[in-house]
Image (spheres, rainbow, N blue to C red):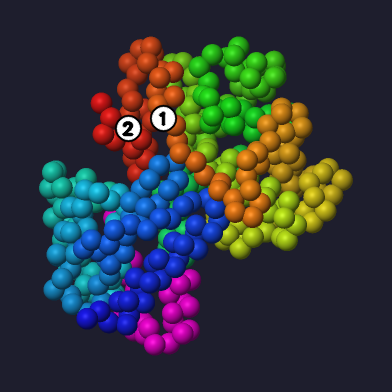
Amino acid sequence: MASPEHQAIAETIDEVLQSLAGSALIGVYEGQRRTFDYSCLLKRDLGRPLVAQVLWQHEHGIDKDLRTLLLDKDSLIKVYAIRDSARIRATVDDILVSYRNDPQLNGRLRGLKLIFVPPDFDADHESQRRWLRGFLISSFSQDVAFAILFGGLTKRVFEVFMGHNGPFGLKYAILDEVVNNGLTHMPSFKNHLGYKSSGPIREALTMLNATGLVQNWATSNCYFPTIRGRFILDFTRRLLLDVNLGTGWSEHTRGIFETLQVPTPFYPEAGISSANLRIADSFSTNLLHATACEKDFGRDLLKGVESENPKLYSEFDIERFADQMQLAKGFRRDFFDQPEYLFFPNLGQS
């Protein structure tokens, strides 16, 4: 029978993931438990199955647990929560070294996340259960949300994007067009934007490509979306939604600022306009860019988003972009793969 600590950790993993889903930036759907303590499907850009195993009392089960997790072919993210001790860490390290040294097995380590819980954790104490929740929220936010689902967004990338100026709304219009349709023909791209000056478009594309918010097909003028760029658009929708609701930054938005180590910015209680925003503040200026995207380029970033039950993520439509590139010399479908973020839209495709 599982210990109270074992049960508390498994239950808290579910609670934390459901809390992250409250941001409307990811979806969490129940999975089949099978042989694992927890299982779910994380939805953002595509589905990433997650399984979790907890070890608290029976140290002899480490090898079996790790083998079961690492050899599971149906999951991309594999979480192992373990009672911490020097002996347990040494055992885990020995097992993982054997996988790293085996060319046929080292790829199985991709997606493995180890969580070491202090050995004196006591599930009977409410204060310690609250601590566990905060600890797992921080861990999952950094290692699952930002490191995988949000495309490795960093404070530096966020600040570079926020600080880019140019014509108001243009960077958002460009990113929105690339995310939805790609860029394969510049005259057509300009027509879609309703903007004819090449210089500001090139400057914005250079910034977006350098920060990994779009990706350029080598030796061409073609640009395509990345999961990081798609997240920036969706997070901006979260910000605009928070402002429209008029109740301050949501708990989930503040959590994202905290994970990015960005000071919580000024909240525009009176709405978004040059009259009530701090223009010298790059974050406030960026909100003006986001609203100008609709005013100047006819692109409402909140179109189709419900205020009460929003969904701020979608599927990455890889087929449309792959079809656009079929005639490009040397094109391979895995151009869209981003293995560092466990993003394999072509998995199982020819």
Residue 250 seen in the current view: yes
Task: For the residues labelled 2 and 1, say whether their Cβ atoms are less than 8 Å apart.
Answer: yes
Amino acid under disc 2: Asn
Q: Is residue 336 above or below residue 98?
A: above
Quarter-wise, where is residue 11 in the image? bottom left
Q: Estimate the x, y position of residue 281 in percent, counting from the top left.
A: 75, 48
Q: Is residue 269 above or below residue 306?
A: below
Q: To which residue does mark 2 refer? A: 346
Q: Which residues are magenta?
A: 112-136
Q: Estimate the x, y position of residue 60 in percent, counting from the top left.
A: 13, 73
Direction right: furthest residue: 275
Q: To which residue does mark 1 refer? A: 318
Cα distance between the residues tagged 2 and 1: 8 Å
N-terminal label among 2 and 1: 1
Observer-nearest residue: 36 or 29?
29
Q: Estimate the x, y position of residue 121 in percent, counting from the top left.
A: 36, 82
Q: Is residue 328 rendered magenta in the image?
A: no
How many numbered dots are placed on residues in this image?
2
Q: Estimate the x, y position of residue 221 in percent, counting from the top left.
A: 50, 17
- Left or right: where 49 falls relative to 313: left
- Give the residue drawn at x 22%, y 81%: 1
Amino acid under disc 1: Ile
Element class at badge 2:
loop
Q: Is residue 260 above or below residue 92?
A: above
Q: Is residue 124 rendered magenta in the image?
A: yes
